[in-house]
Amino acid sequence: MKKIRYIPYGYTMRNGRTVIAQEEAAVIREIFSSYISGASLQSIADLLTVQKIPYSERTDVWDKARIARIISNAKYIGEGEYDPIIDEEQYEEAAAVKTARQRNTFKKNLEGINLLRDRVRCAACGAPMRRRVSNKHRIRESWECTNADCGERIRISDSHLLEKVTILMNRIIANTHLLLPRPKKRKDLSMAVQQISREIDAELERDNPSDALIIAKTVELAGQLYAESDAQLQIAASIARKRVSLMTPQEEFNPAYFGDIIAYITLGSGGQVILHTKTDAEIGDDENECNKDT
């Protein structure tokens, strides 16, 4: 019969009594030991998943939420009907580590959000978005479009927004070709190009055209055409790809990596995030997990 998790991981029912499941208890002790030694919730979950340690009969996939619940569960020190798996000192030490990390996470989140403040744009209209905080909602943070005619407001927590950005940044690190600029649509010559062309034509129609002026204007025209072409972006993308190849995937938002690669982000309906790189590429997610205010 398949084992369903009605009782905490590390315990099982035997003859109507809750008893320690020794193999799972060994995993519990290793989780606490690793966490206290500095391992992150995600790295512990990843390791258990790679090792195919079963969480239940239904799955051997672990995530950081499951690890967090284990770290915070007082039943493991013998609360109520449960026999202790770890001692109280180890439990308190893990709790102290958790508190310290939460403080550090808050500080890092604040640093990350301060960096994003001037780089978040509305996906609907392209206008800048302003961060708002309200205690009236379960998710306190939201981003409001500054365009009064748009009025878009996306409610998403700071930690979730930074997590989404980090996931997309890691996707770029793993696939540097994502930095290649988007192909540009053909368009008419710009006003600047047209103006320089007219000046060259006007000079050529003169009785005694100036060779020096024509050469100078031709060079200027070539420079303007180059500036409006994809060539500069292709060179920038090549340089950026080399720099990104030296980066390593991150578990948390990395301000230095973000500032090096990203020009701005757009935030859209459902909390969809799109990174706009300095090479004119776009990398986005397809999630719709956040709340849109109406």
Image: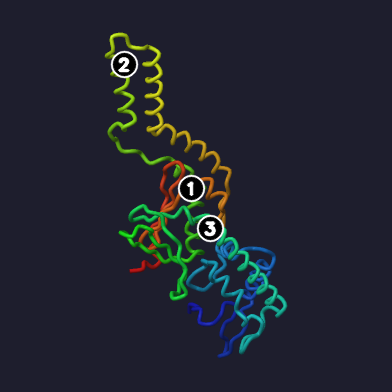
Q: Earlier in the sequence, mark 1 or mark 2?
A: 2
Query: Which residue corresponds to mark 3?
Result: 114
In front of the other: label 2 or label 3? 2
| Residue depicted at 49% across the width and 36% down the height | 238
Q: Residues within 10 Å of mark 2 (few under 14, many from 20)?
A: some
The image position of residue 38, as x and y in percent, is: 67, 63
Residue 203 circle label: 2
| Residue depicted at 42% across the width and 42% down the height | 280
Q: Earlier in the sequence, mark 1 or mark 3?
A: 3
Of 153 and 235, which appears nearest the observer? 153
Picture quarter with the C terminus: bottom left
Query: In the structure shown, which secondary structural element does the residue marked by tag 1 occupy?
Result: strand
Query: Which residue corresponds to mark 1?
Result: 262
Q: Residues within 10 Å of mark 3 (few under 14, many from 20)?
A: few
| Residue depicted at 47% across the width and 72% down the height | 58
Q: Earlier in the sequence, mark 2 or mark 3?
A: 3
In front of the other: label 1 or label 3? 3
Q: CA distance from mark 1 to mark 3?
A: 15 Å
Residue type at mark 3 is Asn
Q: CA distance from mark 1 to mark 2?
A: 44 Å
Q: Quadrant of residue 192?
A: top left
Query: In the structure shown, which secondary structural element does the residue marked by tag 3 occupy?
Result: helix
Of 80 and 281, which appears nearest the observer? 281
**166 relative position to 201: left or right:** right
| Above or below 225: residue 277 | below
